[in-house]
Amino acid sequence: MTRTLQQLFDLQGKTALVTGGSRGLGLQMAHALGEAGAHVLLSSRKAADLEAAAAELKAAGINADWIAADCGQEEDIHRLGAETLQRLGHVDILVNNAGAAWGAPAEEHPVAAWDKVMDLNIRGYFILSQYLAKHSMIPRRQGSIINIASIAGLAGNPRGMTTIAYNTSKGAVVNFTRALAAEWGPHHIRVNAICPGFFPSKMTAGTLKNLGEERLAAGAPLGRLGDDEDLKGLCVLYASDAGKHITGQWLAVDGGVSVVMGG
């Protein structure tokens, strides 16, 4: 029998790992998955931040746990994967969200900073996806991987924004998503990406200050920045059976900025 819309979006009984989940966009998506019924496990580097985020989720009636790990380090990623499977049993949904940025003119950008951004923003996505696919998703023949890219991965920057490594890493995330979706489709693993625009967060605070929130909002056709609800719907669509025929796709959640910037 055809399921109702509510049944298609229902994540009851599902498990989800959200990296970079202690604040900002990661915590917003953790709320969304938990509100749809999933058991959510958060990860980031700082235990205190994770403890506070998990308490916030639990106060909202969400089943939440956390594991501190550095997703820029291969050994720590493998430990995170193993401990996650020990806690949850399996992983249905992986949200690769942990990320870093570095601002410097391209001609002066430190190579060490380039490596740090690449290691966290794309290498870490690959290592964690590989681990959970091998140890959970491929044997169970199911899974949804949601990669957080950015509109910075679709085009160049507005004048005054110099983040060459970040842009490059997020462009890589978009095609990593396509390639992985094509390869893992036969295992019934879906892989999709979200490309957020400008959202107020700790990572974007410097950019918003330098470029001006009002100026950036005015440059969006919808005339505003993202808020603490704007990723929820797409995240649950990708994670749930409502999106079971969607894979290898990216969608910008940016108020239309990428339309006028040529993304």
Image: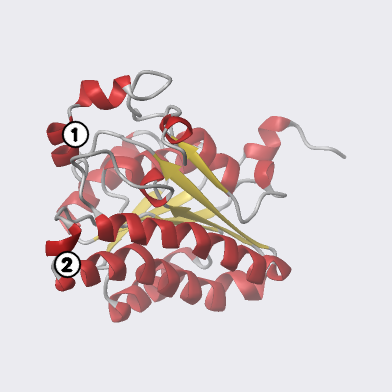
Q: Quick check: 42 left or right of 69? A: right
Quarter of the image for residue 110 reads bottom left
**Residue 37: percent from the left, percent from the top?**
53, 41
204 with respect to 151 (left or right): left
Q: Residue at x 84, y 38 (%)?
A: 2
Estimate how packed mark 2 is, as few (under 14), some (14 to 19) or many (20 or more) residues with alpha carbons within 10 Å: some
Q: How is the image coloured?
A: secondary structure
Outermost bottom residue: 75
The amino acid pointed to by label 1 is Leu
Residue at (70% x, 64% y) in the render: 188
- In the rendered structure, which amino acid carries the disc numbered 2? Ala
Q: Is residue 12 visible from the viewing direction of this image?
A: no
Q: Position of residue 57 (x, y in %)?
A: 34, 40
User: How much space separates mark 1 and mark 2, taking CA atoms?
Assistant: 21 Å
Q: Earlier in the sequence, mark 1 or mark 2?
A: 2
Is 175 situated above or below 139? above
Residue 64 in the image: x percent, y percent? Answer: 38, 49
Q: Which mark is residue 208?
A: 1
**Image quadrant where residue 76 sits:** bottom left
Q: Position of residue 137 (x, y in %)?
A: 59, 69
> Mark 2 sits on what residue?
113
Task: Quarter of the image for the N terminus: give it.
Answer: top right
Determine the residue located farthest toward the right in the rendered image. Answer: 1
Mark 1 surroundings within 10 Å by alpha-carbon count, few (fewer than 14), some (14 through 19), many (20 or more): some
